[in-house]
Amino acid sequence: MNDDLLIREMTPADCRPVAEIRIGGWRTAYAGLVPQSYLDAMDVEEDAEKRRAMLAKPGSSVVNLIAERAGQVVGWAAYGPYRDGEVRTGDAELYALYIRPGHFGGGVGSALLRASTDRCTTAGHGRVLLWVLKDNTRARRFYGHHGFTSDGAEEPFEVDGVEVPEVRYVRAL
C-alpha cells in the first residue's frame, strides 16, 4: 500500500502544506478536547511562516520529515532531543505526527513513525518519548499499536486558558 509513498526531509516549499496538515490535524483530532475558539483562530499562513523561520534557523536539532504521495504532501513528523524542561537528554522525542485529513488509515502515519524511530535508532538514542492528549484515544491507540506505552507521567497543556491533560508515552529502541 505504501509503494507510492515517499518519506523525505522537509524543505521550505513544504511549509504551507505542513501548516495545512497541522491545522487540519488539530481541528480534526482535538475538536471537543481544546477550546473551539482556539481551533477556529488557527491561521495557515501564520503557521507556514513560523515553519519557514524554524527551517531557516541554522543548527536546529529538530528533524522534519514529509510523507509525499503522487506529488502531494500527505503527512508530517518532527522529532529531536527529548525536552525535560529546558534540558535536552540522550533520549529522542517525537514532537509531532500529523496526517492530512482524508488520508487516515492508509499507512502514512505508520511510515512516518517508522522512519522517525529508525533514524533515532541510527542516531544512537535508546528511547523515543512523546506527549499525547489524554483524551485523544485514536492517537493513543495508534502509538500503542506501534509499541509505545504510557509511563504514567502526566502534565497539563494550556490552550486558551484551558488546561488539557497530556500523557507521556515511551518506546525503547
Image (cartoon, rainbow, N blue to C red):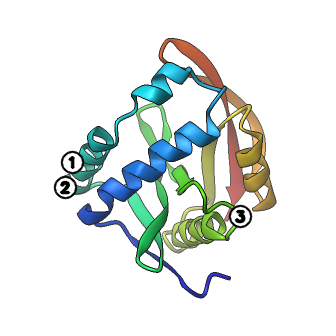
Q: Kindly check if marks 1 and 2 are in contact, taking CB atoms under 8 A apart as contact.
A: yes
- At horizontal 55% and vertical 62% (from top left) the residue drawn is 125
Answer few, some or many: residues within 10 Å of disc 3's Cα (few below 14, many 20 plus, some between 14 and 19): few
The amino acid pointed to by label 2 is Ala
| CA distance separating discs 1 and 2 | 5 Å
For the image shown, how many numbered marks are present on the structure?
A: 3
The amino acid pointed to by label 1 is Ala
Q: Earlier in the sequence, mark 3 or mark 1?
A: 1
| CA distance separating discs 3 and 1 | 31 Å
**Which dot marks residue 56?**
2
Secondary structure found at label 3: loop
The residue where tag 1 is placed is: 53
**Residue 105 percent across, percent down from the top left:** 71, 64
Which residue is nearer to you in this view: 156 or 81?
A: 156
Secondary structure found at label 1: helix
Which residue is nearer to you in this view: 14 or 142?
A: 14
Secondary structure found at label 2: helix
| Quadrant, the C terminus | bottom right
- At horizontal 65% and vertical 26% (from top left) the residue drawn is 33
The residue where tag 3 is placed is: 105
Look at the image and tell me whether residue 82 can be seen.
no
Q: Is residue 4 above or below residue 34?
A: below
Q: Quadrant of residue 163?
A: top right
Answer few, some or many: residues within 10 Å of disc 2's Cα (few below 14, many 20 plus, some between 14 and 19): few
Residue found at the far bottom of this picture = 3
